Image (spheres, helix red, strand yellow):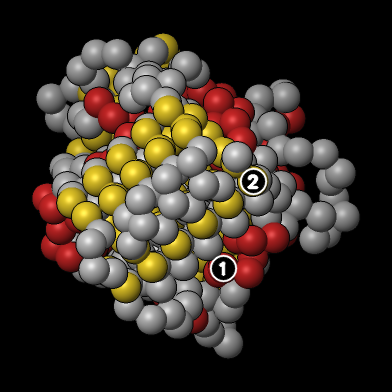
Amino acid sequence: MNDTFAIVYAGHGNPFLGELIAHRAVSALPFAGRYRTIDVILSNISQSGIRDVGVIMQRNFQSLVEHIGSGDAWSLSSKHGGVALLTPFDQGLTTELYHGFGDALMAKRYYLDRQRGRYALLLASDMVYREDYNRLLDFHQEKGADITLLYSHDLRLGLGDPTSVANLQIDGDGWVRGVEFGPGDKEGCYNLGACIMEKDLLQRLVEDACSEGRYDFVYDIVAPALSTHKVAALEHTGYAGRLTTVKSYFDMMRDMTSRQVRDELFFNRGPVYTRIMDAPPVRFADGCEVANSVIGNGCNVRGRVIDSVVFRGVTIEPGADVENCVIMQDSYISSGARLRNAIIDKNVVVREGARLIGTPDNIEVVRKGMIVE
């Protein structure tokens, strides 16, 4: 990987995520009790041996900038290379939101120009999976491909997505013969948002597409290239999820209560690194009831918590009843409150006796900083 650099497109996110991305990018969404979703991608990059990483940001990126910082948590802090935070207005080249990954790459072409690596690894930030990208590069070179994509059969990538997903049509030799765009409601080879190709080819494809007003990376750049270039695909095996809707986020957090999923994401394929925040261990008070839940450090649990993910610094008072919920950092659940199928954003206060009752298909979402009575 010494001859490879990575670019992560930390776009704002799908509008169907609603209030969850009102104050943050999708890659900054809290994840599994103590992480952000981008931690998984950055850990993949670091453990694959890549040391040059550009993170292209779109809007509401301040928390992401603070979280990534110098990249030291992922061993991406270096005098030469390291992580580069590419905010939208850093060169005065644009005053509008990017129309897609292609548009973002065009706006950051100065970053591409100065990269000395031969290969560019392009990554979307709304995907969660663990992968060694050396596998992708090795497969790319062995096949003699011009472009190589990563895909998964995991239906979590498409089910319930109201937008179009890319289903790759792959022959028995691993070559992509077509791309079908539509609902992800059937078995398929779903694009995982990871792609590798030579830097020079990437620059040509991006310039050609953007000159014609085409900005989506898969639809406008990769799919048209099938007729003129050799495009291969490598299968990712294991857990894979995509963040496109409130329900997809809720379901992914609920997946974290599975020991098998946690082992795959955080242990079997190496650790997931994150920004260190010192806090005491969880305090479980006498009389509390906790089962099948993930609870971050610094929490004070005195009530009932079942089948839930609770982030750092949350207080759950005696008599509070929390089941099948996601409670984000520094929120306060008062005595007598009853929560079902809800996502509580950061710094929310749920007052005594309040009730928030959703369903698995219609999740209650309380936005950041609210007081619920």
Q: Is residue 215 above or below residue 314?
A: above
Residue at image location 38% in from the left, 49% down from the top: 320
The location of residue 238, given as percent across then percent down, is 17, 44
Residue at image location 35% in from the left, 44% down from the top: 322
Left or right, 221 with respect to 87, comes to left
Of residues 238 and 234, the one drawn nearer to the viewer in this rendering: 238
Residue 150 figure quarter = top left
Q: Which residue is mark 2?
A: 371
Of residues 47 and 163, the one drawn nearer to the viewer in this rendering: 163
Disc tally is 2
Identify the image quadrant of the N terminus. Answer: bottom left
The label number, if any, that marks residue 67 in the structure image: 1
Left or right, 142 with respect to 195, comes to left
For the residues marked 1 and 2, what is the alpha-carbon distance in whole angstroms? 26 Å
The label number, if any, that marks residue 171 in the structure image: none
Q: Secondary structure at mark 2?
A: strand
- Work out which residue is located at the far bottom of the displayed protein and give it: 79
Q: Is residue 220 above or below residue 115?
A: above
Instruction: Report the amino acid beneath label 1.
Output: His
The location of residue 8, given as percent across then percent down, is 52, 53
Q: Is residue 14 above or below residue 91?
A: above
Q: Secondary structure at mark 1?
A: helix
The location of residue 184, given as percent across then percent down, is 34, 17
Left or right, 62 with respect to 363, comes to right
Residue at image location 30% in from the left, 46% down from the top: 308
The location of residue 360, given as percent across then percent down, is 34, 25
**Mark 2 closeness class: few <14, some 14–19, many ≥20 residues within 10 Å:** some
